[in-house]
DNA sequence: CGCGCATACTTGTCTGACGATTTGCGACGA
DNA sequence: TCGTCGCAAATCGTCAGACAAGTATGCGCG
């Protein structure tokens, strides 16, 4: 079988490339939630040594993209309702501080504008994953635009889990992306107007919407997630 | 003889114990800022293999307690004024959200009360490190009391760097610990009164005080920290 | 005295191996 | 027949040794 050795390793250093590749596969839902990721499996799939795979899994575990306890196999987590609430509470904490800081200065980060443009472009015809990417990029741009290394670092972890959850639920499929884009515009406008209160309010509204969509979908699907990736390619 | 292999490894698993030990040595200032930590040094000091030491350094680097770029030795960071501001900005973001959440419920976490008691006990006669520990424990209790795993995780990283900085500057030496304890009491009281606004205000005041003390000390000491290991023939 | 090259040091990665722990399956006894 | 115990397989934790690659430092040469 082709059970060993042919996943492309893209960018730079070995560990880095491996990490990025596995990360992408997880957040895009290619690796189903609940699926087990052993060190030897990663090692053989990518033709790397086990310590390298181990380091990769450890990094992903630290970021919350994998779960494991001692001597047990790492699994891709499936967030329940409480965890999604917790995740969004933390996300709101960080992003509210970010937009407030931006609004106090009254300047919109250029990267956020670019991401918003990409968002609108992806809203009409592009693939689902591009919409998610653009949405993530927009929020990331807001936070990195503040210029605080540590805030950005915290947000990166949060966004990783957000990305994972969106990839699993594919919540954007059930939503009109233009609505999301409109809410993004509201946030940008409040920042431009140098109105921290309004910016925080718009952001909270935006995130609450997203959270409700996710939880609604979670309840609808129950535990019976549609994972058609199990059988032969149709 | 004493150059290799006799640091006590306390608690549990090897990597865990190693990590905890090195972490403590760093945050307590036993390892001076700017000091280089090579993998082989850790490995020989603790009689562990180099991969184990490597993993330890990687974890500490991820937490911000060490800095290193590729192929270069890890060093204990010395935070400058900008970084301290950034650190306290992030800290305020997290802790403000925490006390607001607590005040909304109107309940003070028992752990915070206990930590505050320890703080007052340490204020009079105990060693400097105990005061720092108690202060850290108090703030940690506030955040973990919210019950958000992710907020607590973010805060843990922040507190690590806070601990490091306090250990380096020993800012508490120049302060009356009773003042700090009083400010802690104000925060607790506002939470008990279920007044989120007041709680946030007390917290911000408390943290701003601490930040100013740190920056003041930084400016006073300048770069002239007591590390006479620099001397070179003129 | 400055610049470039060679050497030493450190890290990145791999191979290979052994002990420890967990887990699942099967056998034995009540 | 059912429950419990024990053994074996799978997996992880740790270690040892080695080579390659990158960085920094010192030396010699111009």
Image (cartoon, coloured by chain):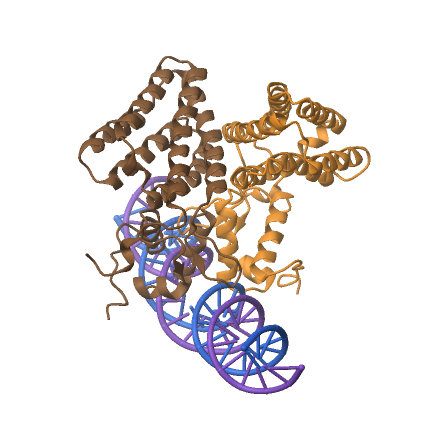
Chain colours: A brown, B orange, C purple, D blue
The image quadrant of residue A131 is top left
Q: How many labels sit on residues?
A: 0
* Residue shown at the point (65%, 43%) measured from the top left: B28
State the quadrant of the N terminus of chain B.
Answer: bottom right
The image quadrant of residue B166 is top right
Q: Residue furthest right?
A: B125
Decide if residue A223 is in sight here: yes
Decide if residue A47 is in sight here: no
Q: Position of residue A57 (x, y in %)?
A: 42, 56
Name the side, left or right, on which B105 lies relative to A169: right
Name the side, left or right, on which B123 lies relative to A225: right
* Residue shown at the point (45%, 25%) measured from the top left: A96
* Residue shown at the point (53%, 31%) measured from the top left: B87
**Can you say whether C7 is above or below A107 in the image?**
below
Q: Position of residue A217 (x, y in %)?
A: 37, 40
| Of C30 and A197, the residue lying toward us | C30
The image quadrant of residue A9 is bottom left
Q: Position of residue B4 (x, y in %)?
A: 62, 63
**Can you say whether A100 is above or below A129 in the image?**
above
Q: Position of residue B117 (x, y in %)?
A: 77, 35
């Amino acid at each position: 079988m082709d059970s060993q050795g042919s996943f492309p390793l893209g960018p730079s250093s070995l560990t880095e490339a491996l990490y990025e590749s596995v990360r992408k596969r997880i957040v895009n839902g290619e690796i189903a939630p609940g699926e087990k990721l052993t060190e030897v499996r990663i090692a053989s799939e990518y033709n790397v040594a086990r310590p390298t795979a181990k380091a990769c899994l450890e990094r992903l575990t630290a970021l919350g993209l994998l779960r494991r306890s001692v001597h047990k196999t790492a699994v891709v987590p499936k967030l329940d309702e409480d965890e999604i609430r917790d995740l969004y509470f933390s996300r709101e904490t960080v992003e509210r501080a970010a937009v407030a800081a931006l609004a106090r200065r009254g300047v919109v980060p250029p990267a956020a504008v670019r991401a918003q443009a990409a968002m609108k472009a992806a809203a009409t015809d592009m693939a689902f994953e591009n919409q998610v990417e653009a949405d993530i990029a927009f929020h990331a741009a807001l936070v990195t635009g503040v210029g605080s290394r540590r805030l950005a670092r915290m947000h990166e972890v949060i966004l990783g889990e957000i990305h994972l959850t969106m990839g699993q639920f594919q919540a954007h499929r059930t939503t009109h992306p233009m609505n999301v884009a409109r809410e993004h515009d509201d946030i940008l406008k409040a920042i431009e107007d140098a109105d921290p209160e309004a910016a925080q309010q718009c952001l909270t509204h935006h995130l609450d919407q997203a959270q409700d969509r996710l939880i609604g979908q979670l309840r609808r699907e129950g535990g019976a997630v549609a994972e058609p990736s199990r059988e032969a390619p149709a």
